[in-house]
Amino acid sequence: MPVDLSQLKTRSIEWLKQLIQTPSLSREEHKTAELLMSFLSEYNIQVKRKYNNIWTESYNHPKGARKILLNSHHDTVKPGENWLNDPFKALIEEDRITGLGSNDAGASVVALMVAFIYLQQLPELSYKLILSLTAEEEISGERGIKSLFSELGKIDLGIVGEPTGMHVAIAEKGVIVLDCYAYGKTGHAAREEGLNALYIALEDIAWIRNSRFEKISELLGPMKLTVTQIQAGIQHNVVPDTCRYVVDIRTNELYRNEEVVDYIRKNIQSEIMPRSYHLNSSRISKAHPIVQKALSIGRKTYGSPTLSDQSLMSFDTIKMGVGESSRSHTPNEFVLYSEIMSGIDIYINLLKYFSF
């Protein structure tokens, strides 16, 4: 018997309340993984699990159909200060649902679940639909979505559920974090001895601050380099022989991460140690059928400055989810009931008659 959509929508709010009330900090998501499995099992959906990631696949598709991945994450950051209520207690006031992970990304999780349950019971889709609800997104962890790619096989298109106001991010900035070390020689500060590593670092930081990469993305704008941490010296009268500083780089899709690091390395004196190269910028053509379908149902496109699991996906993706990015990682994080209801309808309208 077909599942009633209005009943599913009602259940989605109950699901979100339970997710908020179950702590799921990155690497500690085992309880929410169990919850999600139980939610889907209510509808006789077979669910698989690896670490704290769960996924399921539709069966109402022709043989050899292309595959669409619906993905969002159920881990959260740690709650910061200035919460007015318990971040692990869902507070419902009229249209507003407040709680840690409500906006990022619990609302997208439950909306995607409802869309999957509804779509997989239709007579036939033109594609195979996979729903994955994953862990460690907030830390780009090895036991998150990355660990599932070998299980899922070739994916043709991904829809990443992150708060975008249900508009479509068709490009996303990547991230490189550099640990930089300037080296000098110790000496007594009073006798002008030694080689001050802090001064060497300051010269390099000035170059970083004033550097300009020529290629500017139409969607993502210019590259952005920001020095965010610095540490040097052991006491007031000793010239420091080492200065460590950290550079946060937000890349656009016009540069490879390795290319960016090589360029910086050639222009500064400090030793550079990238923490990783894999958090790449991404982009999908505006002519892609999923983007055109989104535009046809009134969605807008834009370039996103924030990072998501989209950066780990080598196939075509869009980022589209319930809530607003500006609320993420903030005290008293919230999402609106009306946003969830609308988000469910938009996901279904996007995918119900889609083909590519």
Image: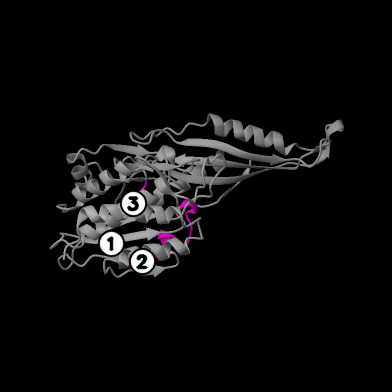
Q: Amino acid at mark 1?
A: Ile
Residue in view at x 24 percent, y 41 percent: 286
Q: Which mark is residue 355?
A: none
Where residue 335 sits, quadrant-wise, is: top left
- State the image coordinates of residue 199 (x, y, percent, origin top left): 70, 33
Return the residue at label 1: 130
How far is disc 3 from disc 1 in space, using C-alphas?
Answer: 22 Å
Return the residue at label 3: 13
- State the image coordinates of residue 192 (x, y, percent, origin top left): 83, 32
Residue in view at x 62 percent, y 40 percent: 229
Tell which of 85 and 304 is nearer to you: 85
Contact flag, marks 3 and 2 (Cβ < 8 Å): no
Question: Mark 1 vs mark 2: which is more N-terminal?
Answer: 2
Q: Amino acid at mark 2?
A: Ser
- State the image coordinates of residue 26 (x, y, percent, origin top left): 50, 56
Discs 3/1, front: 3
Where residue 157 sits, quadrant-wise, is: bottom left
Return the residue at label 2: 38
How far is disc 3 from disc 2 in space, using C-alphas?
Answer: 15 Å
What secondary structure is marked by label 1? strand
What span is colored magenta in the figure? 138-162
What secondary structure is marked by label 3? helix
Question: Mark 3 vs mark 2: which is more N-terminal?
Answer: 3
Discs 3/2, front: 3
